[in-house]
Amino acid sequence: VEKKEEEKTVVQKKKDSQPAVFIPVDRLPEIQEARLKLPVLAEEQVIMEAVKENDCVVLCGETGSGKTTQVPQFLYEAGYASAGGMIGVTEPRRVAAVSMSHRVANEMNLSTGVVSYQIRYEGNVTKDTKIKFMTDGVLLKEIQKDFLLQKYSVIIIDEAHERSVYTDILIGLLSRIVALRNKKSLPMKLLIMSATLRVEDFTENKRLFRTPPPVIKVEARQFPVTVHFNKHTPMEDYTAEAFRKTCKIHRMLPPGGILVFLTGQAEVHSVCRRLRKAFPYRPNNMEHTETEDTSEELRKFKKQKQKKSVSLPRIDLDNYSALPVDEGDEDRQAGIDDSDDECSDLDLGDQPQDTEEKADPSIPLYVLPLYSLLAPEQQAKVFRPCPPGARLCVVATNVAETSLTIPGIKYVVDCGRVKKRFYDRVTGVSSFKVTWTSQASANQRAGRAGRTEAGHCYRLYSSAVFSDFSQFSEAEITRRPVDDLVLQMKDLNIEKVVNFPFPTPPSSEALMSAEQLLISLGALEEPPRQGRMVDMERARLSCPITPLGRAMAAFPVAPRYAKMLALGRQEGCMPYIITIVAAMTVREIFEELDRPVSSEEESSKLAGRKARFSQMRRLWAGQGQSLLLGDLMVMLGAVGACEFAGCTPKFCEENGLRYKAMLEIRRLRGQLTNAVNAVCSDAGVCVDNKMTPPTESQVVCLRQIVLAGLGDHLARRVQTEELLDSKWKNGYKTPLLDEPVFIHPSSALHKELPEFVVYQEIMETTKMYMRGVCAVQPDWIPKLLPQYCHFSGPEQSPAPWYCTLSGNVKCQQKSTFFRVGWKLPAIEM
Ligand code: ADP
Ligand code: MG
């Protein structure tokens, strides 16, 4: 039916406006009825007029007002998808891209081949696709292939208020693309949608849009929400507090769905599990996740049992693997990803106040988890009607804050925290930390309770704490180094990144140091070293990308690590480099043993574990060449041993590894292997979790590759004659720091104290400690890092000599490491 309608419609394409047609959509009556209740429907006329008259339009509307589901339909009906181009919608989260595409297909009564999605690893786009939901990263990659985005007639940037780095860059890019398309008489429209009214960064930014785009506000019907603050703010155990509060609401308050906000997958599962235990409710017709539950319980139980009888695994000294302990565990692997290691049930369950919450189990509570990485079928459950007589309880991360609107929520429980990416300024490596959220986010969360009737929001923190929250969440781009971004943009042939119209620009120092690092890594062309100062400065900020840089841009890791991957195709080193890079990217793969202890008994237990774990780490480090690979060899050995044992929670527990980190490394290894094979089609690296230990010569090669990637993290041991001060004893000097840095006692190289090392990062605790240390040979430095060295003329003796094969004059050259003047051995050039 759909097709015929389209054929009948004559598309009139005016020069600079969009087709004036109407494509009918055959919706089910109940869908139509539900749509009419959405606030955004009242604004359809206004929105479509604005889109027709302007290249770019900003649309603000409270979460749940219908922006994401309805606006693509308005555009479709107005013929924007029938003139040959698609309607593209970007989401910062995969979960939203998938579930919104299903919802819109469903509302429009069209197949998923017409309303489709594309996320990083999967999609259902066909040649008939008219509306395409995708993650912002996917669209960025498409821009890399076709800068004009000719497949699209409209791009909707959804959730722009989240200010994710990719969203920000997309808006900057699209402001140019739209202008270019109009110039070429291939008009394209841009719609920016935000759940908050704070859009000045887009509208008032003259570099972005010369004429400010119109802002349309959708007035949402919102019922009053009463906010209740806690008197006290639990600092640590907010999941336990969330559990207690939810139990209380369920037992004492009138019907209405409960939405609990936590920070991550592990917490979500922990609280779901406890709620299900407290209110067991499993009628046969409910496809509740019993399997998940029982296996989880079983695993916990096993783990508990294992804790009692921990023994050293048998070790084969020639092979770094511990022999497989329990083959059977591998089968349970598949469903294990969500298991919760950070917040164990045991610790929480022992608290006496919990028992009083084990309420009357006859009140049914229908508990559902919701977070980004949850399988789509599981996610979709939150939108289905709750089983009759039961109360819906969704335990979610901040995906439920704005991306998804869950029907029927009357109570919100807000832990006030959010898990955020933090970037290490020294290394550019990212990590996740739980911090307080912003006032704007907390208010968004509260608003979820007032969608269908008046509601209540229970904040698990005091009003004093709330008033200390920052008003808005900062744009992510200002909080992190930008070397990866600059590389991606250069890959888009945006050479002058400083001139790029960022909605919020990163600092010029951040941009400058990113370019400098990328030049050193060989990802960007070296700027001229001569000429006028101003010209040189200018050139330094607009270096084009090199072929190596393009290869590096294809790897989803920090540029230093991408360089290692780009060099990994030597002597069969690739699987090892992939593993080392994955382990460095995941970080914190070893159990933390230096935590404070509360009792004598605990402390002696911990000491025992510590001794055993350091024994394991010594074993993984090996001897000779492998020992010189240092902490990276320990990582490699740990991953290798863990995979040989089937990557079980038991193995990790017994050997001081973080199980979740190991699973993440496994996933990342798979992803990096695919990327490597895609970049060089003949690389032929297999995805095999198990690997035999590297040979001596491979280890030498690995050390050189690591040096090439971490060249700006070189440190040199202070020589005895240079000892100025006792504080420098066993200390290392780095080019950038005035203070000595040290090899941590837990490092594999603590006793070796090699003259030259590279490190992954520096952590400051009692001293400045290098982590992830690897020994390098001084004569490699001028060869592998010539960009960091000053070369002096040929040595007098032996005299320069003539190479008969190549015809080159060969000579010995001496060099120094430039910033610090470290003398390096003369090498043949
Ligand atoms: P916005 O983007 O403005 O936050 P949405 O378009 O996401 O709003 O949501 C509009 C309405 O559609 C909400 O009331 C929501 O409950 C409903 N909705 C969204 N997805 C689904 C779904 N999969 N099933 C049922 N209702 C849904
Ligand atoms: Mg939305």
Image (cartoon, rainbow, N blue to C red):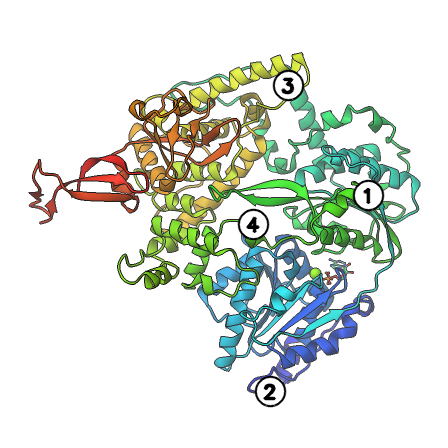
**What's the amino acid at mark 2?**
Gln
For the N terminus, give its image quadrant. bottom right
Label 4 SS: helix
| Residue neighbourhood size for the residue with mark 1, other residues' Cα within 10 Å, grouped as few (<14), some (14–19), many (≥20) | many
| In this view, the mark in front (1 or 4) | 4
Label 1 SS: strand
Label 3 SS: helix
| Residue neighbourhood size for the residue with mark 2, other residues' Cα within 10 Å, grouped as few (<14), some (14–19), many (≥20) | few
Residue 300 shown left or right of residue 393 in the figure: left
| In this view, the mark in front (1 or 3) | 3
Where 336 falls versus 392 (above or below)? above
Residue 248 shown left or right of residue 575 in the figure: right
Q: Is residue 281 visible?
A: no
Is 237 or 71 nearer to us in this picture?
237
Q: Position of residue 363 (x, y in %)?
A: 90, 39
Image quadrant where residue 610 sits: top right
Q: Is residue 736 visible?
A: yes
Q: Which residue is mark 1?
A: 366
Q: CA distance from mark 1 to mark 3?
A: 33 Å
Q: CA distance from mark 1 to mark 2?
A: 52 Å
Q: CA distance from mark 2 to mark 3?
A: 73 Å
Say whether disc 4 or disc 3 marks the residue closer to the N-terminus: 3
Q: Position of residue 376 (x, y in %)?
A: 66, 50
Kindly identify the residue that appears in the image at 52 percent across and 79 percent down: 182
Q: Which residue is mark 2?
A: 12
Q: Which residue is mark 3?
A: 307
Say whether disc 2 or disc 3 marks the residue closer to the N-terminus: 2
Callouts 1 and 4 close, C-beta under 8 Å = no
Say whether disc 1 or disc 3 marks the residue closer to the N-terminus: 3
Q: Which residue is mark 4?
A: 479
Where 517 falls versus 315 (above or below)? below
